[in-house]
Image: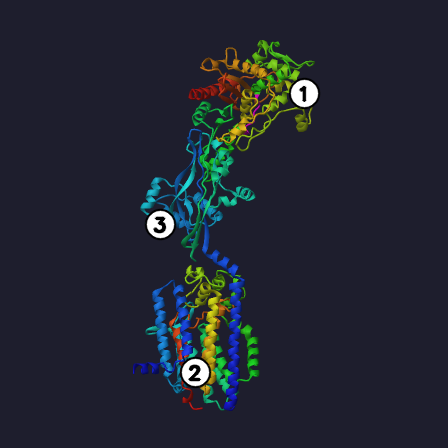
């Protein structure tokens, strides 16, 4: 009897995907233990974050995608309101207003929007699947642009780009003609100088210091340089767990959150990084296979967009700590310390699993 | 758009995105490979630079001791107040805060800023040096008020004898830019990390390398705030070696006391091995003034004084030898078989140059009567030596002077030694483009010509009268290795019989009738000597030298060379008393006091 309930509880969980994610989160915890100087309460918090996230993941995996489809516009509007609330009532941290205090915990609406935008856009294309054309693409673009602009004003360039990317994947997957894609890409390129002028000075500095980190080694370039030193000095085999000098002597900033990958790179070396990349490959592969198998427009678009959002976040974070992108302040999904990031990432996976396990429940 | 077409596009584009993600992660992997494998050495070094700091550990400088272990230079524990330059220090506030305990002067702040600009990595830097015990006690009692100020113990150089022996001991001072350049050239700059003092004069300078030692290093790991996490490795410093000198401080003290207010120099040697037992240069100065950078008032006082206290007269003072040259001139005559006893002259108080109308006066009006070579030394008969010089000629005279070490450095272990001068016809031609006159040979023979010596040269020459065939070198450092050098015999080809004649003359100087007879009267031992008086300025024709009427600075220099006991000389002394008048009367008593003290101690 018990065994029956147990297996029923987990029946919608994709075992391959779940075990890969558990591996990733375990690596994250081990790295966090070193990065936080074995701070037990921090590790405990992160374990709680993971447990909350997994619980939500399992619960979401049981929800019928019909409900997601039904609630998608409401969730989108609710998250827009939250974003606006942050703009007016949020509190500042590290010079940017991104947080809002909701009774027990600090919520970051720009993380929540990562879920609601794919659902909203998937809803749009699902609803209009029989007459997808430029009109629908334009509506999709507006739906995407509103939250992007609000987030850009927070200011949070990293998240804005990330969300823009996740929306763009849906529009792309929904079949926007490649000619239009090229034209928009070209006009974006032409608009770069204007976009540059709209950036805040510190954002411009970050980009400039990426091109030449030595330009101001104790200022903007400092984090980037220290991070590259950490990764580079890790070498092939790494310095060993808790032996990373850059990490342990605090030369590296924000070791538990944004720069946790540098800690990992310093202590576990190239071997460790290749290990993570292999895990990433299998997760991505598994998710793509799942999305390919899905039977309706909403599921396909939502699942694919959520997966790519996660991977694009991961890419941005790693590219940033290894000096390929400016330091924009983006956590590494499943590994960085932080409740919102962890829970949101697991919710995304939960939705994918629900979409995967309820193939036939939405009629085309 | 139909469902089938839509699914088809979706499927292709999904695979495309899948490939794109793999592609961008592959780029990431290339970048990471670049950082971790290709640039590994580079980033490893950067990581180490980040966290490892090297702190020099200063070696303790060697002490300077006299031959009996009396301390002449030591390291005293001093207390300093220090602040961490990494903090943002407001020196004015600190000055204000400390005002109850100790006054931070403008000079202190100037010094702090100087050290700050010159120092390598150091945890704290001194804002106040050398606190008194009361100040230390006050500070400790109120320490809680000054969390940013540290009380530190340090070793600082201290010269317990003050002015006594200051010239040969020398002093330390802060390393300046010139020293830095010099050290860089010698490739020794590394040895001075963590130190800010270096020997500037005397033994402190000459034996700097031995006294200095070698600094150690502590490698520490620091975090991003420069807080020390742990010590990685320590290389202990090699402390400097103590220097034991031949100086006998008891004798030194006696000699300095005997000098009293007179200016001048005195050096006492062991004639058998060249050991310098006493080394006086007067007036002196307090070496302690220099240690932390001499202040301007004191520096002016010392540097601008007409008495030139900073000059090390024993090696840098140049004097005409006066009659103290006569024993060596006599030897030159004997070597050339001129005026060998029993040859004698009748001295009427003047000498007429042959074939010339020019006349040279003897110091004694009316002359000394019948004088042979031995008596000429004993009574310092000028007339005898004028004639001797003219007969001998300057080249033969200079030949002997050279062999006794005149005109060249003795190579004593002291900096700034002067060469002195043996004047000759060639020398005059070269420097003045003038002919050498016979009269100049005559006055050179009584030590009043151009020929000049340092006190140390006079002492060495006198020692060579006793040991002509030993390769003597005066030295302050007491060290067994120099004994090899001592056994090094040279052939000076001095005839022993000739020497005995000269020494007989010198032994009569302190006997009845000699120029220093009054010294011999009260001595319990036999002393051989030669007095000398060197003119500071030439008398105009017809002028009479009257000591009592002349201002001090124009008075003659008094010279005195001596050894005792005459039968078995244990000590050689050379003295110059500037403006001391007649050699026997001022320089002689000083020598006697030193001999008394030394021979008393060695009997």
Tag 3 residue? B146
The answer to whether dots 2 and 3 both sit on one chain is no
- Quarter of the image holding residue B541? top right
Image quarter hosting the C terminus of chain B: top left
Tag 2 residue? A119
Q: Chain of mark 3?
A: B
Element type where label 1 sits in the image: loop
Element type where label 3 sits in the image: loop
- Against B338, is A127 above or below? below
Marked residue nearer the N-terminal end (3 or 1): 3
Q: Nearer the viewer, mark 2 or mark 1?
A: 2
The answer to whether dots 2 and 1 both sit on one chain is no
| Residue A191 on image: x %, y % | 55, 75
Crowdedness near tag 1: few (<14), some (14–19) or many (≥20) residues, C-alpha within 10 Å: few
Q: Is residue B598 visible?
A: yes
| Residue A306 on image: x %, y % | 45, 79
Tag 1 residue? B437
Asked if residue A196 lies left or right of residue A330, the reply is right
Label the magenta part by its dominant secondary structure.
Answer: loop
- Quarter of the image holding residue A342? bottom left
Q: Between residue B1 and residue B370, name the one nearer to us.
A: B1
Report the magenta residues as a range: B315-321
Q: Which mark is residue A314?
A: none
Element type where label 2 sits in the image: helix
- Which colour assignment does the render follow? rainbow
């Amino acid at each position: 009897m018990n065994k029956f309930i147990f297996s029923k509880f987990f029946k919608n969980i994709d075992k391959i995907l779940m075990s890969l994610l558990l591996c990733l989160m375990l690596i994250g915890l081990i790295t966090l233990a070193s990065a936080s100087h074995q701070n037990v309460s921090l590790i405990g918090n992160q374990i709680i974050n993971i447990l909350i996230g997994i619980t939500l993941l399992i619960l979401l995996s049981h929800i019928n995608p019909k409900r997601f489809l039904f609630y998608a516009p409401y969730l989108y509007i609710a998250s827009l309101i939250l974003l606006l609330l942050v703009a007016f009532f949020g509190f500042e941290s590290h010079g940017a207003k991104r947080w809002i205090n909701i009774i027990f915990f600090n919520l970051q609406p720009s993380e929540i929007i990562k879920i609601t935008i794919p659902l909203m856009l998937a809803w749009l294309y699902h609803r209009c699947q029989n007459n997808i054309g430029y009109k629908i693409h334009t509506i999709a673009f507006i739906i995407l642009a509103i939250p992007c602009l609000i987030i850009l004003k927070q200011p949070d360039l990293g998240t804005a780009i990330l969300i823009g990317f996740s929306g763009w994947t849906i529009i792309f997957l929904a079949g926007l003609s490649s000619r239009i894609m090229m034209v928009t890409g070209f006009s974006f390129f032409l608009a770069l100088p204007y976009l540059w002028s709209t950036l805040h000075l510190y954002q411009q500095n970050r980009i400039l210091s990426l091109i030449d980190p030595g330009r101001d080694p104790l200022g903007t370039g400092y984090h980037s340089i220290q991070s590259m030193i950490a990764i580079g000095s890790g070498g092939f085999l790494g310095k060993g767990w808790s032996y990373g000098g850059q990490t342990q002597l605090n030369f590296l900033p924000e070791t538990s959150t944004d720069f946790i990958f540098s800690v990992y790179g310093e202590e576990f070396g190239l071997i460790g990084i290749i290990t993570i990349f292999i895990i990433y490959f299998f997760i991505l592969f598994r998710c793509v296979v799942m999305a390919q198998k899905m039977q309706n427009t909403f599921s396909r678009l939502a699942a694919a967009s959520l997966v790519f959002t996660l991977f694009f976040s991961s890419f941005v974070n790693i590219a940033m700590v290894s000096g390929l992108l400016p330091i924009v302040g983006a956590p590494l999904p499943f590994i960085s310390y932080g409740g919102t990031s962890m829970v949101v990432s697991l919710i995304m996976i939960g939705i994918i699993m629900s979409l995967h396990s309820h193939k036939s429940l939405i009629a085309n | 758009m139909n469902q089938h077409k839509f699914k088809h596009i979706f499927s292709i584009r999904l695979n495309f995105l899948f490939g794109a993600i793999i592609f961008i992660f592959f780029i990431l992997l290339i970048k990471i490979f670049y950082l971790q494998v290709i640039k590994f050495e580079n980033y490893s070094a950067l990581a180490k630079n980040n966290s490892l700091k090297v702190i020099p550990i200063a070696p303790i400088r060697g002490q300077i001791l006299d031959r009996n272990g009396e301390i002449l230079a030591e390291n005293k524990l001093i207390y300093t107040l220090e602040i961490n330059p990494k903090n943002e220090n407001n020196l004015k506030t600190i000055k204000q805060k400390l005002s109850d305990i100790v006054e931070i002067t403008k000079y202190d702040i100037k010094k702090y800023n100087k050290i700050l600009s010159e120092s390598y990595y150091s945890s704290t830097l001194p804002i106040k040096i050398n606190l008194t015990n009361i100040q230390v006690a006050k500070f400790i009692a109120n320490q809680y008020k000054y969390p940013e100020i540290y009380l530190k113990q340090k070793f600082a150089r201290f010269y317990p004898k003050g002015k006594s022996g200051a010239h040969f001991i020398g002093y330390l001072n802060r390393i300046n830019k010139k020293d830095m350049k010099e050290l860089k050239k010698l490739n020794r700059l590394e040895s001075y990390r963590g130190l800010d003092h270096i020997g500037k004069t005397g033994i402190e300078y000459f034996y700097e390398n031995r006294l200095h030692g070698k600094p150690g290093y502590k490698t520490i790991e620091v975090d991003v705030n420069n807080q020390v996490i742990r010590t990685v490795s320590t290389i202990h410093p090699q402390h400097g070696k103590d220097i034991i000198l031949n100086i006998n401080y008891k004798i030194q003290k006696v000699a300095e006391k005997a000098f009293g207010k007179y200016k001048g120099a005195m050096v006492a040697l062991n004639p058998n091995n060249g050991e310098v037992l006493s080394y006086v240069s007067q007036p002196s100065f307090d070496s302690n003034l220099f240690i932390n950078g001499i202040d301007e008032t004191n520096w002016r006082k010392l540097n601008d004084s007409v008495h030139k206290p900073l000059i090390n007269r024993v090696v840098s003072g140049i004097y005409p030898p006066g009659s103290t040259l006569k024993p060596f001139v006599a030897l030159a005559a004997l070597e050339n078989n001129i005026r060998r006893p029993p040859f004698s002259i009748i001295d009427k108080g003047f000498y007429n140059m042959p074939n010339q109308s020019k006349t040279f006066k003897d110091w004694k009006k009316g002359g000394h009567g019948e004088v042979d070579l031995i008596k000429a030394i004993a009574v310092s008969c000028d007339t005898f030596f004028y004639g001797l010089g003219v007969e001998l000629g300057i080249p033969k005279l200079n030949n002997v002077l050279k062999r006794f070490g005149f005109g060249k450095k003795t190579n004593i272990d002291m900096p700034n030694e002067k060469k002195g001068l043996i004047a000759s016809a060639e020398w005059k031609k070269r420097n003045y483009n003038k002919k050498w006159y016979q009269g100049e040979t005559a006055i050179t023979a009584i030590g009043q010509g151009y020929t000049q010596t340092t006190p140390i040269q006079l002492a060495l020459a006198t020692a060579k009268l006793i040991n002509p065939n030993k390769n003597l070198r005066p030295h302050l450092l007491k060290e067994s290795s120099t004994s090899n050098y001592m056994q090094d015999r040279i052939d000076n080809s001095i005839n022993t019989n000739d020497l005995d004649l000269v020494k007989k003359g010198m032994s009569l100087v302190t006997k009845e009738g000699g120029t220093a007879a009054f010294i011999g009267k009260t001595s319990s031992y036999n002393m051989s000597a030669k007095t000398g008086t060197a003119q500071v300025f030439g008398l105009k024709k017809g002028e009479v030298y009257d000591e009592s009427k002349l201002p001090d600075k124009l008075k003659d220099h008094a010279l005195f060379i001596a050894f005792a006991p005459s039968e078995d000389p244990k000590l050689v002394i050379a003295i110059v008393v500037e403006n001391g008048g007649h050699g026997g009367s001022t320089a002689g008593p000083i020598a006697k006091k030193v001999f008394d003290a030394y021979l008393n101690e060695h009997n």
